[in-house]
Amino acid sequence: MEKPRQSWAGLANISFGFFGIQIGFALQNANMSRIFQTLGASMDDLPWLWAAAPLTGLLVQPVIGHMSDKTWLGRLGRRRPYFLAGAVMAALSLFLMPYSGALLMAALLLWTLDASLNVSMEPFRAFVGDMLRKDQHNAGYAVQTAFIGFGAVAASAFPWLLDHMGVANEAPEGVIPDTVRYSFWAGGIALFVAVLWTVLNTKEYSPAELAAFGEAEQAGAAPTASLADRDSKGPFVWIIAGIATLLLTYRFALEKEVYLLAGLLIGYGLISLIAIRMARAGRPASMLTGIVGDFSGMPEVMKRLAWVQFFTWSALFIMWFNTTPIVAKDFFGSTDPTSQAFQDGANWVGILFAIQSLVAAVAALTLLPFLAGRIGKVRTHIVGLLCGAAGFASFFVIKDPNWLILSEIGLGIAWASILAMPYSILASSLPQAKLGIYMGLFNVFVVLPQLLVGTLMGTIMKLLFPGEPIWTLAFAAATLVLAALAMRRVEVPGEA
């Protein structure tokens, strides 16, 4: 048996919840640097404040992926319980964020918001693979990318629209402007309603139905068996690397964010060591052994795409936390968060992100299917990544902020490809029974570069380009070129 072919309405219902999830992410990405600076954070504080967000994704997504693969709650299904739980928590975080009166509160709410968004988002990636036959994966992820784009447009533009409607865009020192406050409240409502729409208008395939489709088989050896055969020296390498990083950070007084990197290295080594010893002791398979075992036994296509993701998301994270201070300083002439010029620059960043997202939505439905059908998914993604590199490089040439719209066209094409092509390739290559855990583990290569950027970029910029954040975009352009080169190693069946 084959899965029924979904209509365009069915494709839309499957991914409409992502419209709301992306509203949450876009509000976070476009406004959190602004909120942190409003509450007294300096440019040097931004990397470690932002580091909380990707760390939650690193911890949450593999766990949720593993759990959702093994969940079945009758009429509520496999993935939809996680959509709903994450949406409730994310909406509450968005409502509370404007009440932040101190940096600590804002940072904790960012942590909660990002964790909640990840609880909803990870199962949505697997949901497309669950619901669609392989010949519809391109269309499914294109529609999902379009909703991501439209959600980001709505969220990014809202503060700017409120400002032009007369809502106060300035506030006393330490107070979040009303334009941002109302945007977060509206975003919380939109997020919950959009996710609820998908929950109420879709029906997941039961384990018995997946078995009838031939998609219930597990692939490869059991995680505990493969772990038992692993060399236990490997985890000690990670632990030693973490301790060395810790000592170097203390000895040379590096930025405090590097301590987080050291902790992650030590933590991964300890978790791997525990999982290997549990497997050798013959313990029953658990979440820990399952996740560590699946991570070490990733399919080859996933390993090669991991390098692409690593370089890609390094560039994106640089963009998210630096675009507002770059545009405010270099194009609007202000570094003072209480000034009108800074707030005007921050609002213009919202518009730029909205344009980027709109371009991504249109490109996902038009340009990407056209290119993928003629030159294949691999070459299509290479083209998209190079468009993004050109967009970052153009910030050094353009002087008028209005012309930054051209930069966002290149970045929008890249964003569309980043959100569609790797996941389409993966969904067609992975075993259905492990789709959730592998999509969650794939997120490690989205989060790890963000953590590295968050922990190391502050040190690099302080040493080489103090007070000149625009040079981070040179790093971003270079890493997208590296991602395009890494993409040449990815092989897709049927593509030359």
Image: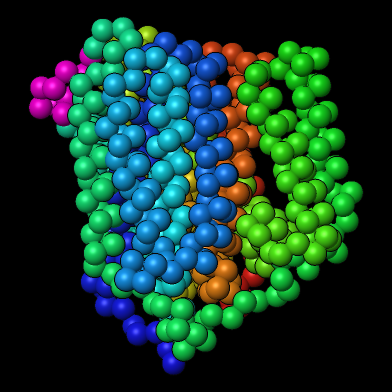
In-image side of 184 versus 483 (left or right): left
**Residue 124, how many percent across, how many down?**
41, 60
- Residue found 67% across the figure and 54% down from its top: 288
Q: Is residue 144 visible?
A: yes
Query: Magenta span has 165?
Result: yes
- Residue found 32% across the figure and 62% down from its top: 15
**Residue 384, how many percent across, how many down?**
48, 54
The residue closer to the viewer here, 260 or 148, is 260
Q: Quadrant of residue 369?
A: bottom left
**Residue 451, how many percent across, how many down?**
60, 35
Magenta region's main secondary structure?
loop
- Residue found 25% across the figure and 39% down from its top: 187
Query: Magenta span has 52?
Result: no
In-image side of 234 versus 87 (left or right): right
Residue 367 vs 167, above or below: the answer is: below
Looking at the rendering, the stretch of residues picked out in magenta corresponds to 162-170
